[in-house]
Image: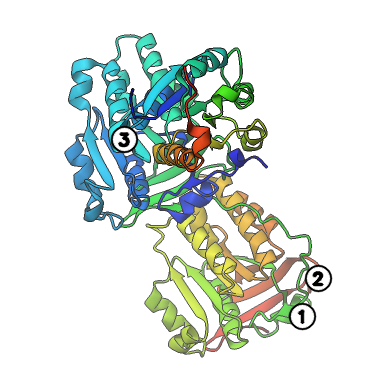
Amino acid sequence: MNNVNNVNRVRTGSIQADYVLGGGFPDHSINIIMGQPGTGKTIFAEQLLFENAQGDRPSLFITTLSEPLTKAVRYVQQFAFYDERKLGTDIQYHDVGSLLTAAGPDGLMPWMTDIIKTTRPKIIVIDSFRAIHDLSTSVQQMRRMVSELAGLLSAYDVTTFLLGEYTGDDVQRFPEFAIGDGIVEFARRPLSTRDERFFRVLKLRGSSYRQGQHAFRIGAGGLEIYPRLVSPNLPTNYEPRLKRVSTGVAGLDSMVGGGLWSGSTTLVVGPTGSGKTTLALQFILEGVRQGEPGLYVHFQENPAQLRRAIDSLGMNAEKAIADGLRLRYESPVELEIDSIIVDIFESIRSGEIQRLAVDAIGDLAAAASDAQRLHDYLYALVQHFTVHHVTSLLTFESGGGITSTLEYEQRFSYMSDNVLQLALHGQERTRRTLRVVKTRQSEHDPDVRELAINAGGARIV
Amino acid sequence: MTSRAIILVVERDPHVRDLEEYFLNEAGYEVEFALDGVAALARARVLFPQIIVTEILVPKLDGLALCRAVKEDPALRGTAVLVFSILAADARAREAGADAFLMKPLADRRLVETVRALLASRQRTPSSTRRPPS
């Protein structure tokens, strides 16, 4: 194998971004980081510079005409990756705004040649490269400059990032996209109370990468990226673990053929007050009793309410947590499905849990801006449950009020191995029933059974 | 007569030429250029450079053919050849008799260290470093 294929990588400072990029940006590449103002391009680039700020060669952050140098330096100080000792030595900030204003785009090349000779940088960031177009007097002038710059940056052992407020049309129009080895896009999509941000690799020459939109948010540590979940590649020696696990609900195990198959997914559908949360909690607590750690993800009851509910089921919440119960609460207002899905996925992959309950996946659906995206995520997650032998129970509120409830119910039913239908009856709607609608790879009791809920929890009568 | 070692660079890319000249000058060497293999061989037979740094992809006579021609010429036995190419052709360069191979892009420290090592190895074998009478 030629050594040309043994590509070294420039890491980004975000493990998840490196994962998306197949290990990082190939070194000695020219990369374009595109996105509208405020999408996180500059922070991403600075995080990358600080990650690589070691060794005997500096990295250069060159500002042009969009953001003043003082701003770029001022804002970076609030992030955990910032290290004052690196400034001026390992990371050098330069401003070529006045040079470009005086000399136009043609002023950049002599300056770049000189700075490469005198500082011998290993990484160069130019922010914003797109802004230089505004000073160009002709398309030819910019094309010539970009071609010269590409020649220089290809000749020397340096990895380059050209940042810019590029839009989709610019990709076809501007010559830098023809010379870019990598193109990464940052985008922001407004939702009602907050924005969703996405990171997407459009091109990465000489490297594989994870396609699609990967959600991210900007925190104190810089960019936190949640790689899009995809279905696992089943290992060829994969064998389903043929073991039944108890639901924890007296009388229910026999209705589903002797318990739920380990690694299966069960959807519990019913209206408000029909017993979904009780069933989900009993399922998780039964696991804790059996020595099977479980994660309970909930969006409605706050943590105090949930602890009371656990106590009322005859188990001390603190003891349950000590014995392997994990609670993950997220306010439905702040709900970000990507971070929750990644958290669940990490719990599965690390082998921390054997049971999982999500109460309720309708809340995830309501928070998702893209139904297909949520469906793809959940579908992939269900596949991971199977591979990692995590038995899961998902609740879904029927008649929940979101416009596409039926569509979601059908989607979730389709991806689940078992479906339990809960219902309320009578004028006071105090009588509850449970019906097993479907069980995959099991015989089941097709009859409607009465479900009683009292202080000790739910049981089939 | 200058005491600085002469390095003949055979390279078409103006950016690589410019950077090679800068870093090699800075390291204390005299740099001469040729744009193709035929011109390089002719220049070598006049200059008797201590080192020829050549890209493989150069016109008229490629860098490997140039290397073989240099190695077959007794008058140039004091000249080392460093093949510095965009191609991952380490083995082919060695087969052609090259004394060293580096792959592009230009990493200044690696280039200068390789040149230094080649000169040092020439100095350890004095008979091969003697410049033939002109």
| Residue A192 locus on image (x, y percent) | 37, 45
Give the foreground label among 3 and 1. 3
SS for callout 3: loop
Task: Return the x and y of residue A437 as percentages of the image width and height.
Answer: 73, 65
The CA distance from mark 3 to mark 1 is 57 Å
Crowdedness near tag 1: few (<14), some (14–19) or many (≥20) residues, C-alpha within 10 Å: some
Q: Which mark is residue A37?
A: 3
Q: Earlier in the sequence, mark 3 or mark 2?
A: 3
Subunit of mark 3? A
In which quadrant will I find the C terminus of chain A?
bottom right
Q: Which mark is residue A440?
A: none
Contact check, label 2 and label 1, Cβ < 8 Å: yes
Give the residue number, with chain letter if any, for mark 1.
A258
Q: What residue is pinned by disc 2?
A: A442
Chain letter of disc 1? Answer: A
Give the left or right position of residue A111, taking residue A183 as reference.
left
Residue type beneath disc 3: Pro
* Residue A69 visible: yes
Q: Position of residue B107 (x, y in %)?
A: 43, 37
Q: Is residue B59 above or below residue B107?
A: above
Figure quadrant of residue B75: top right
Q: Residues within 10 Å of mark 2 (few under 14, many from 20)?
A: some
Please tell me which of labels 2 and 1 falls first in the chain. Answer: 1
In which quadrant is the N terminus of chain A drawn? Answer: top right
Q: Nearer the viewer, mark 3 or mark 2?
A: 3
